[in-house]
Amino acid sequence: MLKFLNRFKLDETGAVTVDWVVLTAVLIGLSGATYLVISSSVDGIGGNINQAMSSSVVSTGSNTAPGGLVTAGTN
């Protein structure tokens, strides 16, 4: 029995698998944390873009001014 325990203790046959499982778990955890941090900022930027696009006017242009997107205060 003592021989079996010593052999089991010295056996490294599954160590690489355990390392990969730990590294994968850390990667998934960091990905989730990054998502939580970035998601609110992306939602805020999307709302700002939506508001800017909604308040913009598309101009077809005239003889003196080119057409394009006109936002408030940029006549």
Image (cartoon, rainbow, N blue to C red):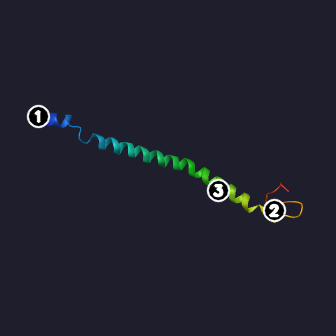
| Percent coordinates x, y for residue 20 in the rendering | 34, 43
The amino acid on which the numbered mark 2 sits, given as a three-letter code, is: Gly
The residue beneath circle 3 is 46
Nearer to us in this view, 62 or 55: 62
Which quadrant of the structure image shows residue 23?
Answer: top left
Taking the spot 72% from the left edge, 60% from the top edge, the residue there is 53
- Residue 8: x and y in percent read 18, 37
First along the sequence among labels 3 and 2 = 3
Q: How many numbered marks appear?
A: 3
Q: Does residue 16 appear to the left or right of 59 in the view shown?
A: left
- The span from disc 1 to disc 2 (Cα, nearest Å) is 87 Å
Q: CA distance from mark 3 to mark 2?
A: 25 Å
> In the image, which is nearer the foreground, mark 1 or mark 2?
2
Image quadrant assignment for residue 75: bottom right
Q: In terms of image quadrants, where is residue 55? A: bottom right
| Residue that numbered label 1 is attached to | 3
